[in-house]
Image: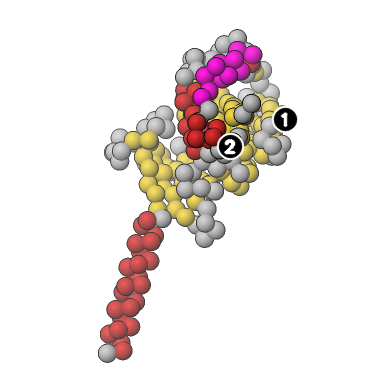
Amino acid sequence: MKLYYSFVFLLLFSCKSVCFAQEDTIRIFYDKDWNEIPKSPTAAFYRIAYNNDNGFWQVNDYYSDGKLQMTGVFLDRAMIKKQGSFEWYHPSGKLKTKATYMNGRLIDEEITYYENGQIDTYRHFDNSGKQTDEKMYKPDGSESVCSQAEYPGGLPEMYRFLTENVKYPRSLRRRNIEGKVFVSFIVDATGKLSQLFVLASPHNLMAEEAIRVVRAMPNWKPAERDGVKVAIKYNLPINFQLD
């Protein structure tokens, strides 16, 4: 009888462990522009995230063929705040980008690579997330001549657009909650914005509003590299401050 009860206890314990493991694992599917979609055989990417021993979320993104596309740790279940080292990979499996984050902000270095291993882009950030240096290179290692993507009319017009269009969430205004949201997005070769993502936000409502406003922006003037229009990543801080 003791053996029987031990077996039943072990079985129940094992089932409980499996259930917790399933509950703590998240699977998400995306189209080619990283928009979330229902599970589909046509998904371009998929994500597997699970709660690690530190209470954070280990996230691995994959190409449709099962090859690793990205790996890193998020501080939250919503997978907004990156923490520590992140790596992205080309479809071939070679390293594409490596970067370091602190509480959702880029710090230290972000380096992207060509498939031949040469550095494509080097960026340096201070601990507040402010970019302090940037250099771009050709596949042969020589430095590129570049111009940044730009909002129509430049920074003054962009700040005017944000001032006129950002709506402070009422519930946060009543509670005097302020803060800064960092939004990352791609400005493609036509000037269209895509792959919008919140790097850090004091509150989910602020994050949602920041994404809404950036999505409503007109097309930008695209970046150029050695005379050719190219896609580029842009990080934009949006400040929510009460008068």
Q: Measure the C-alpha gap from mark 2 to mark 1.
A: 29 Å
Predominant SS along the magenta part: helix
Front residue of 18 and 163: 163
Residue 239 within the segment the image draws in magenta: no
Tell me which numbered mark, 2 or 1, is placed earlier along the sequence. Answer: 1
> Disc 2, disc 1: CB below 8 Å?
no
Disc number placed over residue 185 in the picture, else none: none
Disc 2 residue type (three-letter):
Ile
What residue is drawn where x is 69% and y is 37%? 128
> Is residue 120 visible from the viewing direction of this image?
no
Disc number placed over residue 132 in the picture, else none: 1
Which stretch is magenta? 156-167
- Tell me the crowding category of disc 2: few under 14, some 14 to 19, or many 20 or more residues within 10 angstroms, Cα based: some
Q: Secondary structure at mark 1?
A: strand
In the picture, measured across the screen, residue 133 lies left or right of residue 24, that is right
The picture places residue 123, in percent across and down from the top left corner, at 67, 32
- Tell me the crowding category of disc 1: few under 14, some 14 to 19, or many 20 or more residues within 10 angstroms, Cα based: few
Q: Where is mark 2, residue-wise?
A: 177
The single residue placed furthest to the front in the displayed view is 174
What residue is drawn where x is 41% and y is 55%? 24
